Image (tube, rainbow, N blue to C red):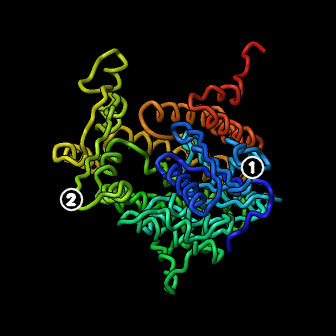
Amino acid sequence: MNVSMETDRPLRILILALGGEGGGVLMNWVVAAGRRAGYTVQASSVPGVAQRTGATSYYIEVAKANDARAAALALVPMPGRVDVVIASELIEAARAMERGFVSPDLTTLITSSSRVYATAEKLAMTDGRYDSDAVADAAQALAKSLHMIDLSALAQDHDTFISATMFGALAGSGALPWSTDDCRRVMGEGPGAEANKSGFDAASTAVVSGGAPPTANVPPSPSPALLLPSDLNLSAVSEELASIATHGYDLTVDFQDAEYGRVYLSRLQRLMTAADTNDHTARHALTEAARRLALWMAYEDIVRVADLKTRPERFRKIADEVGLQPGQVLTVTEYLKPQAEEIAAILPVKFGQWVRRHVSAGGQLPFVGEGRYLKSTGVWGYWMLRTVAVLKRIRRKSLRFQEEQATIAIWLDAMEKALPASTAFAGALAELPRVLKGYSDTQARGQKAFDSIMSQIVLPASAAGRIADVADDLRIAIAAALSDPEHGKLADALPRPADPTA
C-alpha cells in the first residue's frame, strides 16, 4: 500500500549505491515516476570515492505540485530528517545510521543484506570484515521500518542491475506516494527493460511478503558427508571441528594431492591426542589450530596462483560477472611482477638457496622485478601459466615447501606440549600462524615476525615450563604483529633482553 502525503513537508529519500550499480538510473526513475504522478521532485547527487571507501549518495525531495514551498526543496539530507534510506549494500546502511540519517521515529530503511567489502576490510592483516549481524541488529533498533533482503542476488537471478531491485523494494515498501504501476511505466520497453521490470517485480513482492521471494518447494539438500577416516572421530569433539577438518582436508588435497591431505589429518590427530576434548577451552584451541594449519599448509606461491588463474571455473565466473553475451569474446589480462624471492621459493632447495645468495650479493636475474602483462585467455599466456602450475608436481622438493614444513613442525611440537599444560596459551599459540601471509616481501615480513615471537616468547616459556604465565604476552605480540604490516609495533610487545651488566 502506498502512502499519501498528508503532511506539509516534502518526502525525503536518500539513496546509497556503489559505482556501476546504477544509482543514477534509480534516481532518475524515482524522479520520473514522481513527476508522472503529478508531484514536484528535485534530486541531487554527491559522488563517492574510489577504491570502495564509500558510496555515491543521491538525495531526492518530493513535494505536492501545488505546494508553494516546492521551489525551496533542499539539496542535501539532514540527520534525523530523512524519511527513506535505501542502500545497495549492508555496510552502506551502517554508514547512514552512523551519520544519523536513520531515525526510529521517521525512517524506513531498505537495504540489501549482501556485502561488497570495503577497502578497510580488505587491507586488514587478519579478518577485517565488519560484523554483519551487529549491523542488522542496529538497523532493527534504529529504523522505524526495516526491509532487508538480498537485492544483489535478486538482480543476478533476473539478469539485471541492483538498481532495478532497489527500485522494486522501494515501491513495495509503500513509502512512495504514487503507485507501483507508476514506477513500472518509467522503466521503458525492450529486452533490457523487461529484465529490469522482472527484477523490480521480484523485489517488490519480496518486500510486500515480508521476506525472501517465494521459491519452489524443494527439500533442503542434506549436509555433505564428512569424508574422513573412521578412526578420526572429529564429530565426537564438535561438529565445527569436523567441518573445519573436512574443508582443511579438501584444501590441502587441492593444493597438492591426497597424500598431503592425509599429512594434514595426521597432524591434526596429534593435537587431538594431546588435548582434553572435554574442556571447552581446549576444544576452541584445537578448532582454531585445525583452521590455521590447513591455511598454512596451503600457502600461496606462484605455482598456486598460476593454477587458480587458469581454472575453467574462474573464467566462467568472470564471464558471468561481466554479463558476457553469445558472440562476444572475453579477454582476461593478468599483471605479473615476479620477485627474486618468489622464484627462489619454487626452485629445488639448492637452486633456490643459490638464487637468494646471488640476489643478496647484488646479482640480477632476467625478467625479475619487471611488470608483465599476460593474456590468460590467449593460447600463449594460458599455456605459460599452465606450465608454471604443473610445477606443483615437484613442489615437495622446493625451497619454500621444505622451509614451511620445518616451521610447521616446530609449531606443532609447541602446540602438542601446550594443549595439556595451558589451554589459554594453546589458544593463543593456535592463532600465531595468522601472521604468516602472502608471498615475496609480505611473506618474508610475516616469517620474521613469526620467528621473533617463537624465539622470544614461545620457546623460552616452553623450555622453562611457564607457558601459562605468558599467554597474555603471546596474544599481545600477535595483535601487535597484525596491527601493522611493517611490524613496527612488534618490537615493543616482545620481551626486552636481559641486561648482562645488571
Residue 273, image x and y in percent?
Answer: 59, 63
Q: Residue at x 64, y 65 (%)?
A: 148
Q: Which residue is mark 2?
A: 327
Q: Give 437 or 333, whichever is nearer the viewer.
A: 333
Residue 68 disc label: 1
Vertical relation: 215 (above or below) 273: below
Examine the image and state in which quarter residue 135 appears: bottom right
Amino acid type at mark 1: Ala
Residue 12, image x and y in percent?
Answer: 71, 53
Horizontal arrangement in the rendering, residue 163 relative to residue 72 (left or right): left
How far separated are the C-alphas under marks 1 and 2?
55 Å
**Secondary structure beneath label 2:** loop
Q: Give 68 or 21, whichever is nearer the viewer.
A: 68
Horizontal arrangement in the rendering, residue 385 relative to residue 404 (left or right): left
Residue 337 disc label: none
**Secondary structure beneath label 1:** helix
Q: Give 240 or 33, whichever is nearer the viewer.
A: 33
Residue 92 is at least partly visible in this image: no
Amino acid type at mark 2: Gly
- Around disc 2, counting alpha carbons within 10 Å, would you say few (fewer than 14), some (14 to 19), or many (20 or more)? few
Vertical relation: 173 (above or below) 498: below
> The N terminus is located in which quarter?
bottom right
| Viewer-nearest of discs 1 and 2 | 1
Q: Residue at x 69, y 23 (%)?
A: 497
Residue 449, image x and y in percent?
Answer: 57, 33
Q: Are marks 1 and 2 in contact (CB under 8 Å)?
A: no
Question: In the current view of this chain or complex, which residue is farthest to the top?
Answer: 501
Question: How many numbered circles are shown?
Answer: 2
Examine the image and state in which quarter residue 208 appears: bottom right
